[in-house]
Amino acid sequence: MSSFNRKVKLTVINDFICANCCIGQHELISAISYCQETLHLPLTFELEFLPFRLLPTDVVNDEAPKIPKDDWYIKKFGEKKYAEFQACVKKWGEEKGIPLSFNGVMSQSTRAHRLSRKAYLMGGQEKQLPVLCGIFKAYMEESKDICDIDVLADVAEQADVMTREEAIAFLNSDELEAEVNGMCNEARSKGVSGVPMTVIDGKWVLNGGQSSDVFVQVFKKLAYAGVHAAPSPFSAPVHEVSPQIQLKS
């Protein structure tokens, strides 16, 4: 392998209410760690997570009654498809030791995306990633309502991004709301209807929840292809690791 060190820009479009996004985030970070710490690939990674809103604001918002996750998924997809999806998520969680849950209520994710975006603007991936992990943990493992300002303020404080008081003041404002709305709208205008979506160096796209093995194979090809890999070093399509429930509005 050559001695160059290539920077790989990973832009991940996701939503915090999406189990596949949560799984994909864990798998991506695991793959990056493996490539750097075990394989010692000559790659550095720059991550940015962009917002996507699966639930329309006129369906789930502060004024609407809270909807239990079970009720919403069953109504949207039917008991059979929901049960199959739950089984896939449960199997992954048991294998990884991460207790993902479908307890709790459906949350509108705008505030969570605003906090994630704020963290990125404050300090790039070093600030954004701990917030991202904290929000996913609160929603997918602890069954908390991530529309709740107190929940998000706790995440911000635990991630050492802001004090709890600073986070509450930010979340009670409209700072970055227009930007997050614009990003969500832009993604849909470009044809994004389901997440996660991982864009590599602004050139190649991985759709759906991918396993760490898929990411590792991609990163190996990038490492061996050189700094200016063109055309794409990927000769075959990748496949989703689990059935996707696409929450299209």
Image (spheres, grey):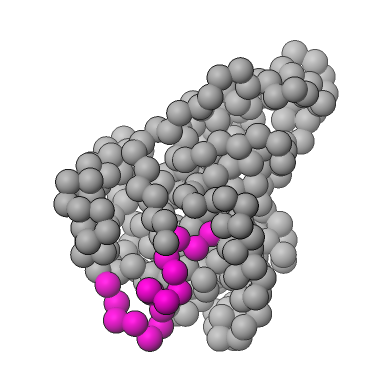
Left or right placement of residue 152 versus residue 59 in this view? right
Q: How many marks?
A: 0
Q: Determine the residue positioned at 72% across, 61% down.
A: 123
Residue 109 location in percent, x, y?
Answer: 47, 68
Q: Is residue 146 visible?
A: no
The N terminus is located in which quarter? top right
Query: Within the magenta stretch, is there residue 65?
Result: yes
Judged from this view, the residue extending furthest toward the top is 1
Q: Residue at x 61, y 17 (%)?
A: 235
Query: Closer to the camera, 159 or 149?
Result: 149
Q: Which residues are magenta?
A: 52-67
Residue 17 part of the magenta-drawn span: no
Residue found 82% across the figure and 26% down from its top: 228
Residue 124: x and y in percent read 71, 57
Q: Residue furthest left?
A: 79
Residue at 47 percent across and 79 percent down: it is 149
Query: As displayed, is residue 224 above or below residue 162?
Result: above
Magenta part, dominant SS = loop
Q: Quadrant of residue 240?
A: top left
Looking at the image, residue 132 sits to the left or right of residue 138; the answer is right
